[in-house]
Amino acid sequence: MIPPEQDGEYVARMEDVLAVYERPYDPSAPVICMDEQPVQLIEETREPIPAAAGRPVRVDYEYKRNGTANIFMFADPKAGRRKVSVTELRTKVDWAHEVRDLLDGTYAGVSKVTLVMDNLNTHTEGSLYEAFPPAEARRLAERLDIHYTPKHGSWLNIAENELSTLTKQCLSRRIGTIEELREQVAAWEHDRNATTVRVNWRFTIDRAREKMHRVYPEIQS
């Protein structure tokens, strides 16, 4: 994404997210990055020929489109942990249920979770109220500290990088059913969490002010 020029709103949200990333690691106050992506399910029409010595696997050019699915990615970059889910849809209710699973599952013992994500219209506290009774929605909302990346600022979302890695390592082949997709994604998640792959984010507010002059508004004296 190409950042805009002299955009105060972009700068404000960028520096807000960078300030969150600069916090020291505290497992009692985790910073979680969230993103999602659609996946086209592609089914083979003919059985691939397995690889053999000196010959790669052979796949027929014909295939069958088998609908789409959605992947929700929640990444805890400093802990080296991620939670990945495959859903049929990506509605407000789907997002809300994923957030509840996160808060009441992995982070059940944490009073407040900082959530970094883009400002898609499904990614709001209002979605909680469309999925749950008011008391339950309020309970969940009070445990969230939400920080939005700016428009054209998806590079600031570490979960997007995790999705890119997932795509390269797991999704770069035909997967025909949502059940198979769930199996493959779960295996990737398990392996990546087992190796505790952490993210050392080095781009700070100071570096942004030094390197991204054209994004910052010019102050008239």
Image: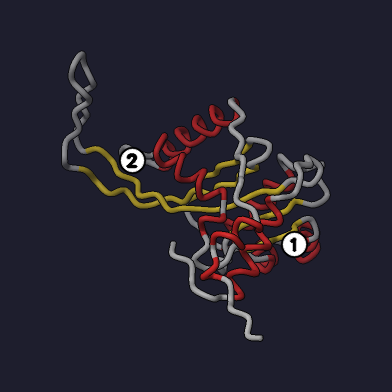
Q: Residue at x 46, y 53 (%)?
A: 37
Query: Is the residue 95 above or below the residue 81 in the image?
Result: below
Question: How dense is the environment of label 2, judged by Cα within 10 Å: few (below 14), some, or many (20 and up)?
Answer: many
The amino acid beneath tag 1 is: Ala
Q: Residue 84 carries which label?
A: none
Left/right placement of residue 158 relative to residue 130 reads left
The colour scheme of the drawn protein is secondary structure
Dot 1: element: helix
Residue designated by label 2: 176
Query: Is the residue 157 above or below the residue 218 in the image?
Result: above
Q: Residue at x 75, y 57 (%)?
A: 144
Q: Position of residue 124 (x, y in %)?
A: 64, 66
Q: Which mark is residue 137?
A: 1
Dot 2: element: loop
Image quarter of residue 107: top right
Q: Residue at x 16, y 35 (%)?
A: 60
Quarter of the image where the C terminus is located: bottom right
Q: Foreground residue, 24 or 121?
A: 24
Image quarter of residue 77: top right
The amino acid beneath tag 2 is: Gly
Question: How dense is the environment of label 1, judged by Cα within 10 Å: few (below 14), some, or many (20 and up)?
Answer: some
Q: Where is residue 189 in the image (x, y as percent from the top left)?
A: 54, 34
